[in-house]
Image: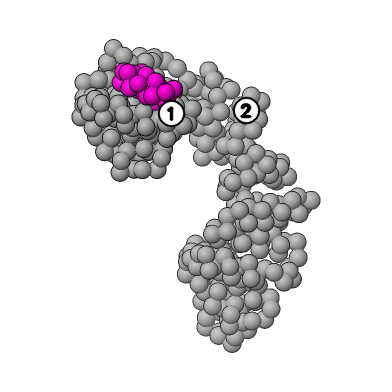
Amino acid sequence: MLLLLFLLFAASDSPTQILQRGLAALQHGDLAQARSAFEEVAKRDPQNAFAWASLAETYARLKQPAAAADAAGKAEQFGADNPVIDHALAMYFSKTGEFRHAAELEQKFAASPRSDAEAQQRVANLLLNAGDLPAASHAAEKAVAQHPSPAAENVLGRTLLAQGKTMEGEAHLNAAWQDAQTDPHIAFDYVQALLRQENFDKASEVLTTALESSPNDVQLLLALGVVRYGQRRFNDAITAFLKVIQTDPQVEQPYVFLGEMLDQAGDHLAEITRACEKWSARNPKNALGPLLVAKARLASDSKDATVEALLRRSLVLDGKNWEAHYELGVLLEGRRDWAGAATELKRAAELDEKQAMPHYHLARVYDRLGNAEGAKAERELHEKLTGSHK
């Protein structure tokens, strides 16, 4: 009897009430409940653009791209004159990477009475992501003129940088940062521009300020590591990268950076090795994992017996990684396996023609193999790449 009364009550709910329940469920991450509610509304009112737009978002989160695209198409069809639907669909298409279409929809919203102060700024961001720099610049300038804000200055600065207008772009990024020094995203964008100019001291100032309010922001900590490396403060750089790993151990970049700094690791080497081992174990299909573990163990013990298997495992996962071939070649060279070393070093040189060290070692190996002509050619290549030839 209670069930019957519940069903009768539920059946009396209006589409608007069901839609509201669905939106509440979506907000709380209950995708199954949200989908059920939105599908019920769409069934009762097939031209309800709000239901279809909500379904597009829900299907996308449920990893059902075909259903999401179909729902988005119906939302656009039935909500063509509704700026709120335009805005919702702009957000949907931005997540699917259709930035041009998203910008067109958001521009319609920005031109409507329902618009908010950040709408034109979002249009500029979407156009920038779409690669339409002239349109993005126009939209960003309009955003700054209509609703001045650090975010508007930021997108204008990034657009100008993308156009190659370095000084103008940095000026706007600096203006954005001056007004929002605790905003991690604005700080990061400004630091990126400063790093391109190798202005490490100013970048350090920006990061120090931003990290006071966002001490565990991964992007800022990564950038700090890069800045400290540029300042030749290697221990501080390593500390920053290790803090990134402590904050979010799944982020790949700090392991890559640390793998290039093993000669500066000092007392951190054991900690770096353990971190790489854990990351490799969590990502067994990533060729970078065993390569980094091999390099870390070699830095600790050049005769570590586990290294060859690790390097070969890395190459099974990705045979086009020049560095894994190089490290294996050097290892085999040290074991006097000249033929095996030559094969690996030659492959490393083929995979990345800009790397000098494979040619250096290959010349040594060819000498051992009695290939004087080959050794001479490799030395010449090494000298050309390092600029050491006279």
Q: Position of residue 39 (x, y in %)?
A: 32, 31
| Label annotation for residue 390 | none
Other-residue count near label 2 (Cα within 10 Å), few / some / many at <14 / 14–19 / ≥20: some
Q: Which residue is mark 1?
A: 26
Image quadrant containing the N terminus: top left
Q: Earlier in the sequence, mark 2 or mark 1?
A: 1
Residue plotted at (33% across, 22% down): 11
Other-residue count near label 1 (Cα within 10 Å), few / some / many at <14 / 14–19 / ≥20: many
Q: Could you tell me how far apart the alpha carbons at marks 2 and 1 are, in whole angstroms?
A: 28 Å
Q: Relative to the observer, which residue lies in front, 280 or 211?
A: 280
Place residue 284 in its image quadrant.
bottom right
Region rendered in magenta? 1-23
Dot 1: what SS? helix
List the single residue furthest toward the top: 113
Dot 2: what SS? loop
Q: Relative to the observer, which residue lies in front, 58 or 154?
A: 58
Horizontal relation, residue 44 to residue 164: left or right: left
Q: Which residue is mark 2?
A: 214
Horizontal relation, residue 386 to residue 84: left or right: right
Q: Amino acid at mark 2?
A: Ser
Q: Position of residue 331 (x, y in %)?
A: 65, 72
Is 19 a magenta residue? yes
Residue plotted at (57% across, 22% down): 181
Q: Relative to the observer, which residue lies in front, 122 or 96?
A: 96
Q: Position of residue 273 (x, y in %)?
A: 71, 55
Q: In the rendered image, is residue 357 in sight? A: yes
